[in-house]
Structure formats: structure tokens, C-alpha cells
Image (cartoon, rainbow, N blue to C red):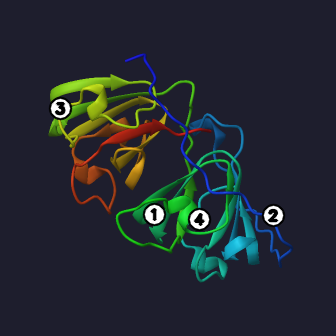
Amino acid sequence: MSTSLSRPLKRSRATPLRQSKMLRTRTSQPDLSVGFAPFWKILVWEQEDFQGNCQEFTSECHNIQERGFTNVRSLRVESGAWVGYEHHGFEGQQFVLERGRYPRWDSWSGSNAYHVERLMSFRPVFSASHRSSHITIYEHENFLGRCVDFQDDYPSLRAMGWCNNEVGSMRVQSGAWVCYQFPGYRGYQYIMECDRHSGQYQRWKNWGSHAQSPQIQSIRRIQQ
């Protein structure tokens, strides 16, 4: 499909960066041979509104508690795209993090299915490419049934003619995508990448540890 019905995702209002105690911790540089972006950089704070201890990362963080934090309550993405997780070890709800400021937990979690204030691990999304993204969704598991190709953002799959509120499987040919449980980019977020699982998501249980059903009703490209 080439016609775009996308509309911009609402961002929370930025708040001024206040002075806080900062500890700069530069983790090991990611292997650039596996990605498409030249650099990834994120700063995280232990308190809301960019207060308290701060650390800088240029690669994944498996467990923020190992860095002396109890939780991440605000953050700023300087470059690249990232995905945050509710629990350590890249488990639980997923939150797409694109360039910008996130002063509170609700600025990255949006309208989720349940209240979550935790962000305990995060990693870069190496394959994000807003200009070159291609995904195919299938009606049933194992890439069976009706299928549709997407290369643009769609706030409502049903409005584009998709048969129901569920997606059985997905194949990501290029780029990275975030799929949402409800129309208008709301509800649970599922990050789909061409360089993870070889871009093959055979069933909804492959979408993440928080996946509870195959319900997908909106989809958009992740911006680098």
C-alpha cells in the first residue's frame, strides 16, 4: 500500500532540563556493522523531571539496578531509537523511545492497558529506518491466510480494509515497527525488527513476554 493515512504521534510537552547530580557512564560502543544508524545515545534519570542521579548510555542496559538506580523515571534520547522494558532482562511491557525528552513515565507509556511506572532495562533499535520500512501481516499463524504489505504508518488497520482486530503472524522485510493493541497508536506496544528473529514473527507469542492476545489495530514505523 502506498497511500499514507498517518498522523503524528502526540508527544508530551517538553520540560526544561534542570540541574541534577550527574554520573556519566559510557558503556561499550555497539557493533556498528549490525545497524544502520551511526550512533545511539540516551540519558536516564532516577527521578521525574530530569532530577536525581543521571547516567548516559550508548549501548544496551540489561538491568538499571546494576547501575545503582532503583528505577528510571525520566529520560532523554539524544540520538537513535531505543526500546525500554518494564522489567530487567528486556522483559515485560515494551516502550518505543525516539529522539526527545520524556519527563515522566506516562510520556513513554502513553495509553497502555494497565498502569506501569517501571522501566528497568533498555536497548538500541539498530534497524530503525523511517524512509525504508516494509512489513507484511498475515491473518493466521505461520504466515498463512490473507496478507497485506505495509510501508507507511496506519492509525487504523480496519479502516485500511484489514479483516479483523487480530494479526496471526508478521514478517519484517526492512526497518523496525511498533504495533499497537488499539487504533490511534494506543494500548500495548510490540516492537518488530528485521534484525531480530530474522524478521520472522510466526505467532503472537513471539511479540514479547507481555503479549496476551493477537490483537493489533494500528501500526507505524519507528523513527531513527
How much space separates mark 3 and mark 1, taking CA atoms?
Answer: 32 Å
Please provide percent x and percent y for residue 214. 22, 49
User: Mark 1 or mark 2, which has the lower sequence index?
Assistant: 2
From the viewer's perspective, is 81 left or right of 133?
right
Examine the rendered structure and indicate whether residue 157 appears above or below residue 23.
above
Check disc 2 and report its element: helix, strand or loop: loop
The amino acid type found where label 2 is placed reads Pro
Q: CA distance from mark 1 to mark 2?
A: 29 Å
Mark 1 residue element: loop
User: Label 3 is placed on what type of residue?
Assistant: Cys
Residue located beneath label 4 in the image:
61
Mark 3 vs mark 4, foreground winner is: 3
Q: Residue at x 36, y 69 (%)?
A: 114
What type is the residue that disc 4 sits on?
Cys
Q: Position of residue 77 (x, y in %)?
A: 69, 54
**The image quarter in which residue 142 lies:** top left
Q: Are the residues flagged by discs 3 and 1 in contact, CB closer than 8 Å?
A: no
Give the CA distance from mark 2 to mark 4: 26 Å
Residue 16 is labelled as 2
Residue 167: image quadrant is top left
Residue of label 1: 90
Mark-to-mark CA distance, 2 and 3: 45 Å
